[in-house]
Structure formats: C-alpha cells, structure tokens
C-alpha cells in the first residue's frame, strides 16, 4: 500500500514513518509534503496514493484549501493537535481523525478502517442495492429455522437487526429468527 504523509513538522513525519514500518514493512511511504503548494503539485503530477495521512495545519495554511484545488478521492486519516477541525475533516474523504501524539494502536485501527472502506467494494454494494430497488417489492422472507426454512410475510416483520455478523428478524408477535 502506498501511503502519502502530509506533515510540516519533520519529527512528526519521522515518527509516523517509523510507526507505519512497524505496523507493516511492506508499506511504501511517500512524503513529507509540507505545504499546500506541495500537495497541489503532487496531485497535479498524477500521483495517486492508496491512503493519505495528513496534518491539517501546514506551513502555509490549512490542507483543506489544497484539497479544494485538486481532484483527490483518496481516503484520508487526519492527524492534528487540534480537535476543532474534526467536523470539517469529514467533508474530505476522511475516515479517521487522530489527535497528536499518535498512538500506534490507534493508527493501526485507522489503517484497518481505511482498508475495510475500500472504494472498490462500492460496486459490490451497488449491486446489492440495485437488487433491492429494482423490480417489485419484497413480499416475504425465507429464513432458516430449526431443520428447514420458514416463510415470513413482510407485514409480520417488526424490524431487522444486524449484530456481530448475524442478521436477526423480529416479528410483530415477538418471535425472532
């Protein structure tokens, strides 16, 4: 995985790079980009990392301004000492917001989340939603029950609940499958 680090403090860059190599030595780390202009140049030259780890305040302003000027659809983990930018960060493909100093376990969790939210999986999700939205509406569910299956009418369903990898169906009469 190619990871770009946008960070204007060299010691923070070195620490992030070290943590990334400890997490997975196969990561290719690029950077640091220390300014808005460096970020713009990087993307205008056709570079596309798999993941960005970015500080918010750079030497010449906020990284958001640079992202506004380039077509960047890469997932971003923001790292900053300031919590005030959290809401704005999620307008820019942000999948996580880590406060400095970065903790190795938190970084590992954020990268795991980035991998799990892989944009290539969107086509799979779209295929599922197309099946739901096209054609006639569902009238019943076929659910596994004991040694066979049971048919449940939609009008008898109170709600569906996904819990720890298990989808449960609850009927209006209180039964659950």
Image (cartoon, rainbow, N blue to C red):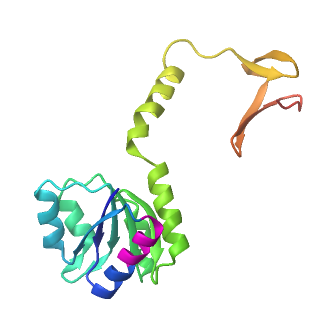
Q: In which quarter of the image is the N terminus?
A: bottom left
Task: Using the rendered image of the protein, determine whether residue 85 is visible from the camera's viewpoint.
Answer: no
Q: Viewer-proximal residue, 81 or 144?
A: 144
Q: Viewer-proximal residue, 12 or 29?
A: 29
Whether residue 77 is situated above or below residue 159 in the rendered picture: below
Please tell me in which quadrant of the rendered image residue 169 appears.
Answer: top right
Q: The magenta stretch spans which residues?
A: 16-24
Residue occupying the point 46% across, 49% down: 117
Please tell me in which quadrant of the rendered image residue 119 appears.
Answer: top left
Residue occupying the point 63% across, 16% down: 138
133 with respect to 36 (left or right):
right
Task: Using the rendered image of the protein, determine whether residue 50 is visible from the camera's viewpoint.
Answer: yes
Outermost residue toward the top in this view:
136
54 with respect to 176 (left or right):
left
71 with respect to 174 (left or right):
left
Residue 20 lies in the magenta-colored region: yes
Whether residue 165 is situated above or below residue 97 in the rendered picture: above
Q: How many marks?
A: 0
Whether residue 52 is situated above or below residue 59 in the rendered picture: above
Q: Viewer-proximal residue, 91 or 19?
A: 19
Q: Main secondary structure of the magenta part?
A: helix
Where residue 43 sits in the image (x, y, percent)? 16, 59
Where residue 144 sits in the image (x, y, percent)? 79, 22
Outermost residue toward the front in this view:
25
Where residue 145 sits in the image (x, y, percent)? 84, 22
Where residue 126 sits in the image (x, y, percent)? 44, 30
Q: In which quarter of the image is the C terminus?
A: top right
Residue occupying the point 22% across, 61% down: 68
Residue 79 lies in the magenta-colored region: no
């Amino acid at each position: 995985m190619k990871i770009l680090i946008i960070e204007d403090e060299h010691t923070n860059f070195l620490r992030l790079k070290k943590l990334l190599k400890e997490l997975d030595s196969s990561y290719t780390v690029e950077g640091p980009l220390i300014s808005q202009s460096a970020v713009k140049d990087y993307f205008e030259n056709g570079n596309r990392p798999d993941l960005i780890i970015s500080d918010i305040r750079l030497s010449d302003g906020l990284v958001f301004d640079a992202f506004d000027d380039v077509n960047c659809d890469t997932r971003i983990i923001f790292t900053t000492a300031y919590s005030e930018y959290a809401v704005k960060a999620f307008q820019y493909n942000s999948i996580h917001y880590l406060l400095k100093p970065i903790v190795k376990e938190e970084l590992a969790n954020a990268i795991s989340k980035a991998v799990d939210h892989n944009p290539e999986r969107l086509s799979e999700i779209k295929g599922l939603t197309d099946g739901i939205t096209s054609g006639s509406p569902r009238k019943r569910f076929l659910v596994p029950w004991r040694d066979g299956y049971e048919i449940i009418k939609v009008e008898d369903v109170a709600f569906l609940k996904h819990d720890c990898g298990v989808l449960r169906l609850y009927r209006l009469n209180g039964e659950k499958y």
